[in-house]
Image (cartoon, rainbow, N blue to C red):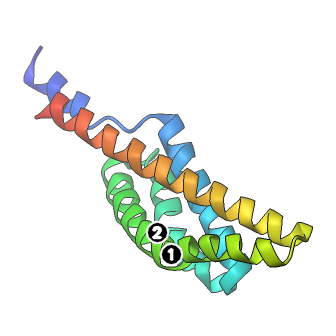
Amino acid sequence: MGIGEHKSECLEGMPLNLRWLALAAGCSCGLAGSLLFGPSFFIFPSTQILGAVIEAYSPRLGKVLLWIGACILTFYAAIFLAPQAFGAIFVLQVRNDLTHIALFLFLVASLALLVWCDIALIIFAVRSKRQCG
């Protein structure tokens, strides 16, 4: 394998399913946060969503935006969304209406998608580091 082949192999973009997972995690967490805290919550996942979209056209910039966005979104989801999900468990014991159950399930699904996305991004980074490094 020549030097040029190795370098171009390391600059390849991430898999399409990982980009879709990052996009889904960002949109679902943004929507869940917007339902609870208003539409301005979409600021936090916007970097991850933008990185997932841009990564197809500019892999280096897209990966940087995606990593920064994943860190920001994970931090704010841990601060805002996770306590709301745990608080919803106690609210479900008092009020058992469909709205609270649906919101609780949406929060749990959004957080699960975010954790899955973070783990997949870490696995991708480790594999690409081993391959290129």
Label 1 SS? helix
**Residue behind mark 2:** 73
- Residue 73 at x, y = what percent? 46, 68
- Residue 10 at x, y = what percent? 22, 34
- Furthest residue in direction right, as rendered: 97
Q: Is residue 99 left or right of residue 54?
A: right
Q: Is residue 81 left or right of residue 92?
A: left
Q: Using a 10 Å C-alpha cutoff, classify the residue at mark 2 as few (fewer than 14 neighbours), some (14 to 19) or many (20 or more).
A: many
Identify the residue at horizontal 47%, vertical 49% (top origin).
Answer: 117
Q: Is 77 situated above or below 121?
A: below
The one of 111 and 51 positioned closer to us in this rendering? 111
Amino acid carrying label 1: it is Phe
- Residue 24 at x, y = what percent? 61, 52
Q: Using a 10 Å C-alpha cutoff, classify the residue at mark 1 as few (fewer than 14 neighbours), some (14 to 19) or many (20 or more).
A: many
**Residue behind mark 1:** 44
The one of 51 and 28 positioned closer to us in this rendering? 28
Marks 2 and 1, how far apart at CA: 6 Å
The one of 13 and 68 positioned closer to us in this rendering? 68
Q: Is 89 situated above or below 56?
A: below
Q: Which quarter shows the C terminus?
A: top left
Q: Is 100 situated above or below 25?
A: below
Q: How many numbered marks does the figure carry?
A: 2
Identify the residue at horizontal 39%, vertical 46% (top origin).
Answer: 119
Q: Earlier in the sequence, mark 2 or mark 1?
A: 1
Cβ atoms under marks 2 and 1 closer than 8 Å: yes
